[in-house]
Amino acid sequence: MALVVQKFGGTSVGNADRIREVADHVRRCRDRGDQVVLVISAMGKETDELLALATAVSQTQPGREMDMLITAGERKACALVCMALHDLGVPADSLTGSQAGFITDTNHSNAKILEIVPHRVRAALDAGRVPVVAGAQGVSTDDDVTFLGRGGSDTTAVALAHTLNADACELYTDVSGVFTTDPRVCTDARKLLTISFDELLEMTAVGCPKPAMRSVEVAQNYGVKLHIRSAFTWEQGTWVAKEEPSMEQPIIRSVTPDTSEAKITIAGVADRPGVAAILFRELADAGVNVDMIVQNASERGITDISFTVPEGDIDMAERITRTVAEDIGATGVTADRAIARISLVGAGMKSHPGVAATMFETLSKHGINIEMISTSPIRISCVIRQDHADTATQALHQAFDLAQ
């Protein structure tokens, strides 16, 4: 008998038929002798719809009330799944995040889990029932409902799997696993049977939308066996595991495109100590997550600094940068929303020279100019024009024979 935590959300529970499919899958898992804990996130686009409603009725949108509103989507889906299970003769109990024992900090909209006290989850399992936990939520140390942020249900599932010492955590989505690139861009994209935590972390950090990066971090930190798979085909997906030092690694595992970032350039900056610190401290204090940073070579004591931020933060980042530019005497600020980031990820590149050269030659051959470059031991990222993103993805996927 295995204990498995299974997470479903979005299109996986997007309508009544899908909810019944999930319930039937759980019944089949129990019939083969497994214990199942479910984590459910909101149906379809419900979170977006709730955010739109909040915008329609409020300009202030207090954090406490926003968390109370957004987490309602998970509770609704959780109760519906539980009802579908009862119809199949599967005893089940729906639990909110607080009822499941998730204690968080007091940061609204992006709370962090401090501890899990899963007494009611364990009691349900001991009674032969299926605990159905509402994802992405908990209760703060101030006794307020908190939201774990976008993708928080993945984190809920992984953290619960660790706490319960589950045999595996299965994250069900609308694709059948982790692919060598976006299958919508490259028709010959190949599903990976296994991938290392380090590689998946890099992929999620540079634009791979699923699973949520926080969930991969938690799984890696606590050794949770992670399985990314489809809620539509039920086929075996991608297993995430620790990298074996003795294993011969493929050079490149993935080409990851990302069109969700924007670039800001502050020009005519005095090249002296502390100037960059002023700018990036102001951005950090405002909660703007800066990714790639490039500073040009100084000419006559003047330089330019370019950096990327999530597209949703571009307006705030631009306002802050313009204010700082006036304070430090910079000559101008420009914002560019029409960029894309293309990244190569692979643990094998640590021991194989020439990956960067092949990447740059491939982009050059297709007339694609590189505006920024950043690297890690297992990743190379380039910023290019957004309208070249698909061409670059397809060309690099072919150049590194990832379809094989």
Image (tube, helix red, strand yellow):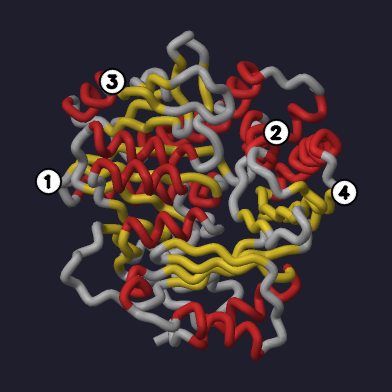
Q: Which residue is mark 4?
A: 331
SS assignment at label 1: loop
Question: For residue 177, what is the image quadrant?
Answer: bottom left
Residue 51 image label: 2
Q: Earlier in the sequence, mark 4 or mark 2?
A: 2
The amino acid pointed to by label 3 is Val
Q: Name the mark nearer the viewer: 1 or 2.
A: 2
Q: Residue furthest left?
A: 1
Left or right: 156, with 44 as reference point: left
The amino acid pointed to by label 4 is Thr
Q: Is residue 169 above or below residue 241?
A: above
Left or right: 205, with 366 as reference point: left
Q: Earlier in the sequence, mark 1 or mark 3?
A: 1
SS assignment at label 4: loop
- Residue 288 seen by the camera: no
Identified at 31% across, 45% down, the residue is 219
Q: Which residue is mark 3?
A: 117
- Cα distance in 3D space between marks 2 and 3: 30 Å
Q: Are marks 4 and 2 in contact (CB under 8 Å)?
A: no
Identified at 41% across, 19% down, the residue is 98
The amino acid pointed to by label 1 is Met
Q: Name the mark nearer the viewer: 1 or 3.
A: 3
